[in-house]
Image (tube, helix red, strand yellow):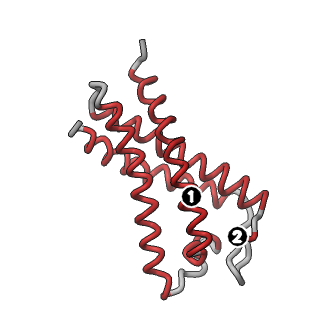
Amino acid sequence: MLTVGTLQLIPGVIGGALTCIPFAIMAWLSYIFAIEIWISDVTRGEQEIPEESKGKAVAWALAFTLCLLGGSIATAWWVASQGYGFWAATLAAYWVQVVINLFDLVVIDILIYQWMKPKLMDIPGVPRLEGTWPHVIGAAKGLIVGVFLALIAGAISLLA
């Protein structure tokens, strides 16, 4: 029989892995259609997003948030529909955030951005962000934001 801890981990990892697919697609699309929205990240906040691109940045941020929240809600709902309560559903939703943050850090930021260095991810006139720590710090911030997304997902799962 599955314990509560296992029940939270398994759906969280599955939900996170499934959510990585639209997340990765959105990331690539953002590099193709709105590379300038990443300028603040790449320059560690030294350069701001151009004024004419701030609307795009907000739209992309909303799309990424909805993707992360959607995966968390689906996973929390799955756990809640099995008769488990708010905290079990919330913890499963948080595992979604952990998986996505690890995917973003290891696959997108380190493997692809730092090691493979595709031209698609270069912002014209802006030097490439070097070093792993800025990416690790970004992932840590993502885990903190993930707590709030998981709590929202857990609350919504109460409707199951």
Q: Quadrant of residue 90?
A: top left
Residue 73 coordinates in the image, percent (x, y): 35, 44
Q: Quadrant of the C terminus?
A: top left
How far, Cα to Cα, is label 2 from label 1? 14 Å
Query: Element at badge 2?
Result: helix
Q: Kindly identify the residue that appears in the image at 54 percent across and 41 percent down.
A: 17
Residue 52 coordinates in the image, percent (x, y): 49, 88
Q: Kindly identify the residue that appears in the image at 63 percent across and 58 percent down.
A: 135
| Residue 70 - label | none
Q: Amino acid at mark 2?
A: Leu
Residue 93 coordinates in the image, percent (x, y): 40, 40
Q: Amino acid at mark 1?
A: Ile
Residue 78 coordinates in the image, percent (x, y): 35, 33
Mark 2 Cα-neighbour bin, 10 Å: few <14, some 14–19, many ≥20: few
Residue furthest out toward the bottom = 52
Q: Kindly identify the residue that appears in the image at 35 percent across and 38 percent down.
A: 76
- Of the image marks 2 and 1, the number of the one nearer the N terminus: 1
Q: Kindly identify the residue that appears in the image at 70 percent across and 81 percent down.
A: 124
| Residue 120 - label | 2
* Residue 159 vs residue 6, the one in the foreground: 159
- The residue labelled by disc 1 is 25
